[in-house]
Amino acid sequence: MITMDITLLIQIVNMVILMFLLNGVLYKPVKKILKDRAERQQGMQGEIAKFEKNARLRQQEVDEKMAKASGKAKAALDSTRAEAQAAGEQRLGSIKAEAEEGKNRQLAEIRAQIDSARAGLKANLEGFANEMASKILGRSL
């Protein structure tokens, strides 16, 4: 059973003093540290959100610049390809023209040689015919 004497009063005073001491020494500093930590985390969350927003904006800028650069590169490639195609077609046309001219020249030379050979053969045709007839008959005509 509990007796009500002076020790109970001393224990109550002791508990009150201990409560004030622990409150001042332990609870308030821990609460302050936790509060500061929560404020720092909120501040960091705000900075993180700001950095993420800046990162998204910069990524969009980079993407836009890359799209523009890609478009310019594609346009330059297409124009260069078209120029090369035109130059190739022009060169091919000139080569074909040279080849056609050379072919026509050689055909003209061959025709001239054929005509001169015909003329030479026609001129000697009578002599060849007499010579062949004499060889076939075995006597001179």
Image: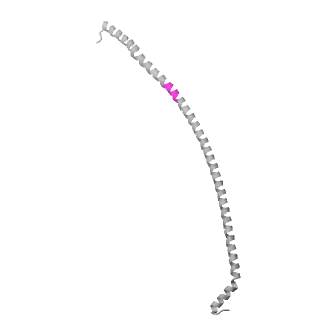
Q: Where 32 sits versus 100, above or below? A: above
Q: Is residue 23 left or right of residue 68?
A: left
Viewer can see residue 5: no
Residue that protrudes farthest toward the left in the picture = 1
- Residue drawn at (66%, 69%), measured in percent from left and top? 106
Indicate the quadrant containing the C terminus: top left, top right, bottom left or bottom right. bottom right
Residue beneath the point at 68% across and 74% down: 113
The colour style of the image is one colour
| 52 or 127, nearer to the observer | 127
Q: Position of residue 60 (x, y in %)?
A: 58, 37
Side (left or right) of 34 relative to 67: left
Question: Looking at the magenta stretch, what is its main secondary structure?
Answer: helix
Q: Which residues are magenta?
A: 41-48
Percent position of residue 121, x then y: 68, 81
- Residue 36 x/y as whole percent: 46, 21
- The question of residue 84 being in magenta is answered with no
Q: Is residue 72 visible?
A: yes
The residue furthest top is 6
Figure check: 66 above or below 18? below
Q: Please tell me which residue lies in front, 85 or 118.
A: 118
Q: Looking at the picture, how far across and down is residue 20, in whole percent?
A: 39, 12
Q: Quadrant of residue 72?
A: top right
Q: Is residue 3 left or right of residue 139?
A: left
Q: How many marks?
A: 0
Q: Report if residue 46 lies within the magenta region.
A: yes
Which of the pair 70/79 is nearer the observer? 79
